[in-house]
Image (spheres, rainbow, N blue to C red):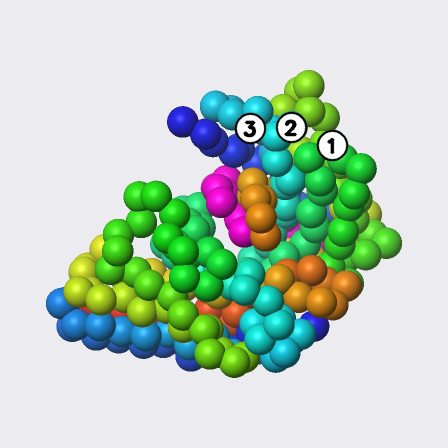
Amino acid sequence: EAQLLESGGGLVQPGGSLRLSCEATGFTLSSDAMSWVRQAPGKGLEWVSIISSTGTNTYYADSVKGRFTISRDNPANTLYLQMNSLRADDTALYYCAKTISRRFVSWGQGTLVTVSS
Amino acid sequence: QSALTQPASVSGSPGQSITISCTGTSSDVGGYNYVSWYQHHPGKAPKLMIYEVSHRPSGVPDRFSGSKSGNTASLTISGLQAEDEADYYCCSYTSSSTLYVFGTGTTASVL
């Protein structure tokens, strides 16, 4: 069964950095584009970033552009999100999602990022 | 890019039908047939229920259906069951630099 497992979340101070990971099991990550989607406490879903299957193309939401970097290690079957200059409004549950033809076909359970002093 | 507009809540009795609307603009919902719907039970991974406006992934019951008219997409759940109680989000591909926009979310309750 295809599964995605996020990790790397935690408590970080404003202005700090964090790197999230998303490990795929049961399928080969290199076949598909991958995205990060987040959900702030009590709020709705927000798309954050997407990376093509080969890692050549990346795109970001305006809210994180210039601060977050998406990357992937296909041999390791792992997706990453490097988050710098973190702000309080980046506090959220971060999901990784397998992305096919502009839809998010499978999701992980999420990893919680809390930005607070 | 503003979130797509959904009603905060909808409810129905078991066996009834409910419809959740998702209103955007010609730059997202109205401009593309890349509207998808996700079911989210709190604490669990979101689940794709409808893609490309009206297509169901395998395994999703045919009680779930999608449609679109102009800048508004809709998700209909027929024959409502207790397990359908969840949050539902629409999502559309957009022409803006933020490639995807989600809806504000709707809590569906089974009375």
**Circle 1 SS class:** loop
**Residue at the disc numbered 3:** A24
- Circles 1 and 3, Cβ within 8 Å, touching? The answer is no
Residue B22 visible to an observer of this rendering: yes
Please state which of residues B57 and A26 is positioned toward the viewer in this rendering: B57
* Quadrant holding the C terminus of chain B: bottom left
Circles 2 and 3 on the same chain: yes
Residue A117 visible to an observer of this rendering: no
The residue at 64%/51% (across/down) is A114
Q: Earlier in the sequence, mark 2 or mark 3?
A: 3
Label 3: how many residues lie within 10 Å, few (<14), some (14-19) or many (20+)?
many
Query: In the rendering, which numbered label is found on residue A54?
Result: 1
- Name the chain letter of the residue that bears numbered label 1: A
Q: Which residue lies furthest to the top in this view?
A: A75
Q: Which amino acid does label 3 sit on?
A: Ala
Q: What residue type is labelled 2?
A: Ser
Q: How far apart are marks 1 and 2 (CA)?
A: 7 Å
Q: Position of residue A102 (x, y in %)?
A: 59, 52
Please state which of residues B35 and A9 is positioned toward the viewer in this rendering: B35
Q: Quick check: A88 above or below A34?
A: below
The residue at 76%/51% (across/down) is A59
The residue at 47%/31% (across/down) is A3
Q: In which quarter of the image is residue B86?
A: bottom left
Q: Left or right: B12 with respect to A110?
A: left
Circles 1 and 2 on the same chain: yes
